[in-house]
């Protein structure tokens, strides 16, 4: 379902995709990769679209910050509500399909859920995530983007809504940073509909590719010889370049207001 | 079996590393052998991830491989990352980590170049090594201080076991190395150093001790260290921590433009604020003195600054909100709120988000997409129509053919270029800067004529449109407003279309010539609005005409009452919503304290919080509008009502005497409001009853002055019948729900302005319930002790309790012995006289009955008097 929509954002989206292309399609194999985590309210639409995109290249996790998984129901006042972590995407899909297949096919929910079921087992809640707890074993092995996330930590978190960014930053503050591990937390404001999620997913991948390039450069330049190689921008470290990378990204994606902070796990 | 596998993996890795360590050459081309080693190591790591128990075997066997001075860069990096991961892992117990920590110190020193071998440190290795150091530091610290508790003779032990002392020395060397080089590291490493410093400060600042005997359960802090510890003397460490904290906080000011350092600092100090109360105030003050918007001062803001300023601002806000959320009674909460408020305003001014958003986010199309469809035409709100230019004489009179928009209405120029210019693209400040001097210089005649021509146009249009409009009004309704915002979420935006009447009302309200004077009549390059604006709402134009809404039919009494009561309910609903959250514990008490904290000079109802509404509502109820209540003002209204309803008069009593009474309705609603949740709303009741009492007193005084003595005093009790009535109502409402240990009743009776006999009677009645005898007696005792005006009354009541309520006998006697001993003596004397026990009992019974009779009679008298 990825290439269906054509909106005004598409042209820039394509260019974003292209930047992604030369970012290292050929050296994806063994080289260093940042680990990413995408976050939205229900871990259904925006974060999962971005998860799908990122997981093709990077180790990726995804979460939702809401108290419950909320999906549109027959009317505004009757949303479908599910528990995080324990309800699988497949279970939600089959329940909705049994309830009103026509409605949920028409509004794209079933399609979305089946995509999600192909990515991982169930929606996960950010606040319940034990950062640093290993994610190994059969429960995780089938998740897309699992390779690299075994240690249960990530380098970059991308939220899809300011509310979620606030929730993530607040949660990290409350946890008291026991791991002493820095994490870049970005927000990319994406409206919660299928079309915007597609555009947003591309934009997030673009950001991820640029960040990873900088991180790889940092690793390559370092060491004794590193000082002779690379020049200018590439000599600066990864973390210090993040604001500039974000600025450039924001100029490419003006419709998706961004936010960033360096937080701690 | 698995254990064997683990050591195997590590051993393999060791074997593999034996070869390449000599040949560790160029870093970028990773030699095969190194790659092989890393593969083995990774295999070993996977084992630890599956079961944390393997760390104990694998970490020690990995150390020589990755820690060797000649090891390849890739190996060292891997090792540093692995160590950071190990000590961060939540699956590994703190004790296991401590054991490992003592073993990795040498390697860590080597990674950081602290062993003096090299000064050049790879960024990746340094980052991980500093992270590891931050995790390890508290563990080593605890290990050292725990020695004291393991055996009483620490000093001997340390001398005996030099390895412990040397562990601490190594840790100290690592610490000083990190601190010394912190500022010369690249920013990526420096942020890790910031975290390290935060950890050190947290460790070396006294925290809260849960249980001094069980150090392993406590948060590791200086508070656990005995004052005379030989290795880690607390005073020195505390001083060091204080210095480091200053250094940490200075980041906010010295690197105020470096978002990376600033946000890393802000996010790391959160846990210090929470867990180290002794330094929390200092830290919060530093944050409050930090201005994340400093960079935005340089106009125009570069796009880079816009992003990072916003990021810093939001991070600061997140930190402060987190503090307040954790501790709502934080001593600095007031300052924090003020700071956030200021920040909010400053940001709105500097970054002008909405304008920026509308410029960058979804620029409105330069031309109306569908110019011919009136339903899609965008309207400029009358208020924000930045109006006009002139060419007054020429283009003025000829209005464009209808339907037209307000923009068109005010557009007087014929220049197409100016017409298409969207003024909203200019920032508001700039417009203001242009307009104000311009208005000063504008030719007055020209301006007048421009205004007149617009006025003429408007009239023409309105007349022309009036007929059509009326016809349209009969129709099915105006075209629905087109939802111009992109719709949020899946749910369609719920924006009901305005109906015709609403639109016409709106237009009626728009002053026909209001905006004109704001525009300069200078025909020069002044832009003319014409284009669509993002905030537009469609409107069927022209809707203006000499249209007057017929006055609504007069409400009959019942409707008035209904509307009145719904208004009152809404205000009370508002108060409910403004109430402090229930988890605030002693809600009412805290709220009261807050109000008193504002000082004597505060004005009632000056802030829009709950207390303000309480004041407003209470005064609405009590300060009756003259004429509202009847012929005689306050007193009259009260008497009417009393006549009809008596003591237990209800809401409808006033109706009986010929009219709906707003004050009583409000009182009724207030009373209900209080009773609904009286534990938290007792302050509302007290505030309200104070108003009642005050108003009646004032009225009483006025009447006395008039010389009609006694007119207002028929009811006795000092002329406050309404007050008394409502005190009783509130008491009636809460009494059934009071439990034996409630302090609410005492508070209520001690704080209301006057306590009457009837109220005391009610308290007495409480004593009928054996469970609540204590409450009744205590309440009376409190009043006796601290409310001298009613002391006699209450002692009487106590005596009555003693005489007539079997359960209250013992407690009442205790207090009577102090306040009215003669009664008890009398009783004893009587008993002595009676002689026989049986006869005494009988007499007792008679006395009791007599007393009960008396009470009843008294109550009746009171009821009649009221």
Image (spheres, coloured by chain):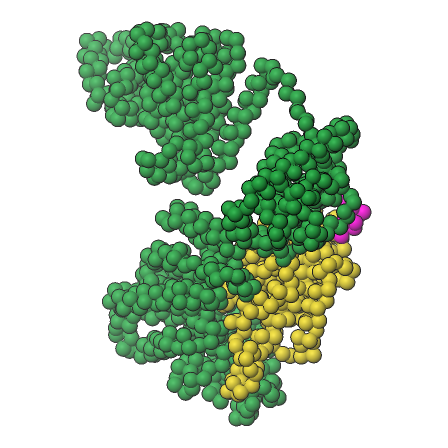
Chain colours: A yellow, B green
Residue B111 lies in what quarter of the image?
bottom left
Measuring 78% from the left and 45% from the top, which residue is drawn there?
Answer: B372
Magenta stretch in the rendered image = A99-108
Q: Is residue B155 left or right of residue B375?
A: left
Question: x, y (%) of residue B824?
Answer: 22, 16
Q: Is residue B178 left or right of residue B467?
A: left
* Depth order, front residue of B445/A252: B445
**Up-down: is B407 above or below A35?**
above
**Up-down: is B83 above or below B203?**
below
Quadrant position of the C terminus of chain B in the picture: top left
Quadrant position of the N terminus of chain B in the picture: bottom right
- Is B283 part of what is drawn in magenta? no
Question: Which residue is the extreme one toward the right?
Answer: A102
Q: How many marks?
A: 0
Question: x, y (%) of residue B184?
Answer: 42, 77
Question: x, y (%) of residue B58?
Answer: 51, 77
Measuring 40% from the left and 67% from the top, which residue is drawn there?
Answer: B254
Measuring 56% from the left and 90% from the top, which residue is drawn there?
Answer: B26
Residue B797 appears in the rendering: yes
* Depth order, front residue of B253/A220: B253
Residue B57 appears in the rendering: no
Q: Is residue B335 left or right of residue B30?
A: left
Measuring 57% from the left and 40% from the top, which residue is drawn there?
Answer: B445
**Up-down: is A116 above or below B458?**
below
Question: x, y (%) of residue B121?
Answer: 46, 82
* Dominant SS type (magenta): helix
**Up-down: is B1 above or below B806?**
below
Q: Is residue A200 left or right of residue B156?
A: right
């Amino acid at each position: 379902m990825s290439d269906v929509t054509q909106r005004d954002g598409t042209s820039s989206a394509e260019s974003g995709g292209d930047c992604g292309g030369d970012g290292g399609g050929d050296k994806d194999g063994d080289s260093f990769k940042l680990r990413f985590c995408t976050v939205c309210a229900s871990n259904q639409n925006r974060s999962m679209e971005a998860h799908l995109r990122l997981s093709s290249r990077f180790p990726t996790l995804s979460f939702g910050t809401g108290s419950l998984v909320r999906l549109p129901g027959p009317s505004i006042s009757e949303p479908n509500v599910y528990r995080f972590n324990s309800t699988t995407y497949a279970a939600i899909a089959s329940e909705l399909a049994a309830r009103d297949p026509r409605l949920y096919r028409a509004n794209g929910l079933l399609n979305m859920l089946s995509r999600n079921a192909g990515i991982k087992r169930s929606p996960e809640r950010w606040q319940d995530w034990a950062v640093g707890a290993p994610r190994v074993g059969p429960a995780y092995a089938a998740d897309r983007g699992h390779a690299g996330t075994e240690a249960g930590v990530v380098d970059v978190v991308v939220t899809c809504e300011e509310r979620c960014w606030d929730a993530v930053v607040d949660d990290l503050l409350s946890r008291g940073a026991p791991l002493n591990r820095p994490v870049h937390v970005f927000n990319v404001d994406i409206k919660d509909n299928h079309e915007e999620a597609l555009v947003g997913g591309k934009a997030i991948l673009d950001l991820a590719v640029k960040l990873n390039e900088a991180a790889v450069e940092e690793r390559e330049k370092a060491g004794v010889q590193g000082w002779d190689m690379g020049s200018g921008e590439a000599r600066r470290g990864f973390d210090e370049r993040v604001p500039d990378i974000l600025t450039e990204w924001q100029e490419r994606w003006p419709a998706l207001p961004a936010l960033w902070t360096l937080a701690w796990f | 079996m698995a254990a064997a596998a683990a050591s195997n993996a590590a051993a393999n890795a060791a074997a593999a590393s034996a070869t390449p360590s000599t040949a560790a050459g160029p870093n970028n081309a990773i030699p095969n052998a190194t790659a092989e080693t890393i593969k083995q190591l990774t295999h070993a790591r996977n084992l630890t991830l599956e079961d944390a128990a393997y760390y104990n075997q694998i970490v020690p066997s990995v150390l020589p491989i990755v820690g060797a001075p000649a090891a390849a860069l890739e190996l060292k990096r891997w090792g540093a990352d692995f160590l950071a991961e190990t000590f961060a892992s939540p699956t590994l117990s703190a004790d296991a980590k401590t054991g490992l920590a003592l073993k990795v110190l040498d390697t860590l020193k080597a990674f950081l170049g602290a062993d003096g071998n090299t000064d050049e440190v790879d960024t990746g290795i340094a980052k991980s090594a500093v992270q590891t150091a931050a995790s390890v530091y508290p563990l080593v610290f605890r290990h050292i201080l725990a020695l004291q508790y393991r055996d009483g003779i620490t000093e001997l032990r340390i001398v005996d076991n030099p390895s412990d002392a040397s562990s601490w020395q190594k840790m100290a060397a690592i610490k000083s190395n990190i601190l010394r080089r912190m500022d010369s590291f690249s920013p990526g490493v420096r942020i890790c150093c910031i975290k390290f410093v935060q950890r050190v400060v947290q460790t070396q600042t006294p925290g809260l001790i849960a249980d001094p005997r069980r150090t392993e359960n406590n948060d590791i802090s200086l508070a656990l260290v005995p004052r005379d510890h030989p290795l880690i003397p607390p005073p020195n460490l505390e001083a060091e921590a204080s210095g480091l904290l200053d250094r940490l906080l200075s980041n906010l000011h010295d690197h105020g433009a470096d978002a990376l350092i600033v946000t890393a600092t802000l996010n790391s100090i959160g846990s210090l604020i929470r867990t180290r109360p002794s330094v929390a105030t200092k830290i919060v003050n530093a944050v409050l003195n930090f201005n994340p918007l400093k960079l935005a001062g340089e106009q125009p803001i570069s796009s880079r600054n816009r992003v990072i300023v916003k990021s810093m601002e939001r991070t600061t806000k997140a930190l402060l909100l987190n503090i307040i959320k954790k501790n709502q009674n934080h001593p600095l909460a007031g300052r924090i709120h003020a700071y956030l408020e200021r920040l909010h305003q400053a940001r709105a001014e500097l970054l002008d988000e909405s304008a920026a958003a509308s410029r960058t986010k979804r620029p409105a199309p330069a031309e109306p997409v569908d110019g011919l469809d009136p339903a899609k035409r965008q309207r400029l709100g009358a208020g924000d129509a930045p109006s006009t230019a002139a060419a007054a004489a020429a283009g003025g009179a000829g209005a464009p053919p209808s339907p037209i928009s307000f923009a068109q209405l005010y557009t007087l120029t014929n220049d197409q270029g100016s017409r298409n210019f969207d003024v909203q693209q200019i920032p508001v400040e700039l417009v203001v800067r242009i307009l104000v001097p311009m208005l000063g210089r504008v030719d007055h005649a020209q301006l007048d004529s421009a205004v007149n021509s617009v006025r003429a146009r408007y009239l023409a249009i309105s007349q022309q449109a009036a007929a059509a409009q009326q016809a349209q009004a009969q129709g099915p309704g105006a075209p629905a407003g087109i939802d111009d915002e992109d719709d949020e979420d899946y749910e369609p935006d719920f924006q009901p279309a305005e109906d015709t009447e609403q639109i016409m009302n709106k237009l009626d309200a728009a002053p026909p010539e209001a905006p004109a004077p704001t525009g300069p009549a200078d025909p020069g390059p002044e832009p003319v609005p014409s284009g669509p604006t993002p905030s537009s709402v469609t409107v069927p134009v022209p809707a203006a005409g000499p249209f007057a809404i017929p006055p609504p039919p007069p409400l009959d009494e019942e409707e008035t009452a209904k509307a009145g009561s719904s208004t009152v309910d809404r205000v009370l609903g508002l108060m409910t919503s403004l109430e402090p959250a229930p988890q605030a514990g002693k809600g009412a008490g805290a709220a009261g304290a807050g109000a008193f904290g504002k000082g004597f000079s505060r004005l009632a109802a000056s802030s829009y919080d709950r207390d303000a509404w309480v004041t407003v509502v209470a005064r609405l109820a009590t300060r009756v509008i003259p004429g509202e209540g009847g012929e005689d003002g306050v007193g009259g209204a009260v008497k009417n009502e009393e006549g009809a309803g008596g003591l237990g008069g209800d809401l409808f009593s006033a109706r009986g005497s010929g009219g709906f009474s707003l004050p009583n309705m409000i009182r009724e609603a207030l009373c209900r409001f209080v009773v609904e949740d009286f534990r938290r709303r007792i302050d509302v009741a007290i505030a309200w009853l104070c108003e009642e009492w005050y108003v009646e007193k004032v009225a009483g005084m006025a009447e006395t002055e008039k010389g009609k003595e006694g007119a207002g005093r028929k009811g006795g009790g000092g002329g406050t019948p309404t007050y008394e009535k409502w005190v009783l109502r509130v008491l009636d409402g809460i009494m059934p729900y009071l439990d034996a240990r409630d302090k609410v009743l005492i508070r209520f009776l001690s704080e209301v302005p006057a306590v009457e006999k009837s109220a005391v009677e009610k308290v007495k009645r409480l004593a009928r319930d054996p469970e609540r005898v204590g409450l009744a007696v205590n309440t009376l005792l409190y009043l006796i002790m601290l409310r001298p005006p009613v002391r006699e009354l209450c002692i009487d009541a106590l005596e009555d309790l003693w005489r007539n309520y079997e359960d209250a006998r013992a407690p009442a006697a205790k207090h009577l012995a102090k306040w009215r001993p003669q009664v008890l003596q009398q009783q004893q004397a009587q008993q002595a006289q009676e002689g026989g026990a049986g006869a005494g009992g009988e007499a007792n019974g008679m006395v009791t009955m007599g007393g009960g009779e008396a009470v009843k009679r008294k109550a009746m008298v009171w009821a009649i008097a009221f």
